[in-house]
Amino acid sequence: MLPGSPLLELLLIAVGVALLYAGAELLVAGARDLALAVGLKASTVGVTVVAFATTAPELFVSLLGAVTVSTDIGLGAIVGSNIANIGLVLGVSALIRPLNVSDTVFRRDVPFMVLAALLLVGLGWDGRIGFLDGVVLLGTLVAFTAAVLRRVRENQSAITDSERDEMPDARARDIAMVVAGIAALVLGSRWLIDGSESLLAAAGFSDIFIGLTVLALGTSLPELAASVVAAVRGEAEFSVGNVVGSNIYNILAVIGIVAVVTPIGVAPGVRGFEFPALLAFTAVIVGIMAYSERITRVDGAVLTVGYGAFVYLLLP
């Protein structure tokens, strides 16, 4: 295959996505076991450790895309990934098995997810997310982290001696899995960006379209894999917490860091369609959770069809 040929770009995309998936699986497994070793509950593990781990692809793709290609890549990857997390990840997971929503996640974490979406839209409405905007997002991330840490301390103080004796021990193998996962994520993100940007740019697609579709879907694969596995195993708190936490970290951590590194331009089309779509998907999932504290198969079908319609409307 010749350098720059479509087959080579497709191979880069496929290998990049595979590395992202493998890296996230290693990172999730290692980080989850380390977290459980210190007594975190399933819902807390989903919102914190696994959510942060599965957000790593978005962070690497957005930072590398912003620095080497275009900030549209990073912004599109985040907005598209958050919409995919709600419409595709929760939708497909609920189709497999209805998902009960933890009261703790709904009361303590979902408000931060809503706040993050509102901040992104509000700060980006003037067409630019700059350094100070990034500081605001990172400051909100600090507040979220402080709230989570307070909850972790409450959980740990409630652990009995007998429960502590049954907790697994932290292993060096888990740390090695985390390191290997991060390495795979870095390399996979690099190849995914190179292959996607070259292939779609050559076909005449815009950077924001590339970010909102191929990169968003590619970087949402870890969330999809983790949530589907959790649904199959009946661990709904883990599945829902993963998506809620990922959507929080995507905006507050990833966009916050990228904006501090380099200003992010927000095109009029993004403010006119993608931002309202993000708010709409967020409002729908919050409404579903508030109404029944459960995401049913019917809800899953609605979310999945809604995501399909979003992707269809993106097509040029």
Image: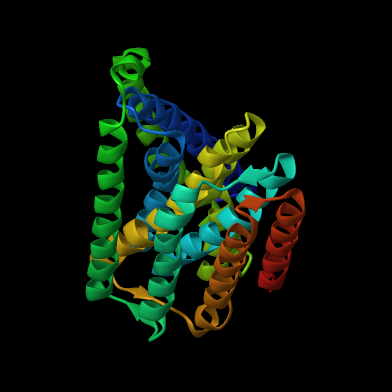
Which quarter of the image is occupied by the C terminus? bottom right
Which quarter of the figure has residue 180?
A: top left
Give the left or right position of residue 259, taking residue 78 as reference.
left
Tell me residue 160's x, y (percent). 31, 22
270 or 54, which lies in front? 54
Which quarter of the image is occupied by the N terminus? top right
Residue at x 24%, y 57% (from the top left corner): 142
Tell me residue 262's x, y (percent). 27, 68
Give the left or right position of residue 260, taking residue 21 as reference.
left
Q: How is the image coloured?
A: rainbow
Tell me residue 301's x, y (percent). 76, 55
Give the left or right position of residue 9, taking residue 123 as reference.
right
Which quarter of the figure has residue 281?
A: bottom right
Instruction: Determine whether 204 is above or below 302 in the image.
Output: below
Tell me residue 176's x, y (percent). 32, 21
Does residue 141 appear in the picture of this structure? yes
Instruction: Determine whether 37 is above or below 196 in the image.
Output: above
Residue at x 70%, y 72% (from the top left corner): 313
Residue at x 39%, y 83% (from the top left corner): 127
Give the left or right position of residue 262, taking residue 285 as reference.
left
Which quarter of the figure has residue 62?
A: bottom left
301 or 191, which lies in front? 301
Instruction: Determine whether 102 is above or below 315 in the image.
Output: above
Residue at x 38%, y 41% (from the top left corner): 186
Does residue 3 appear in the picture of this structure? no
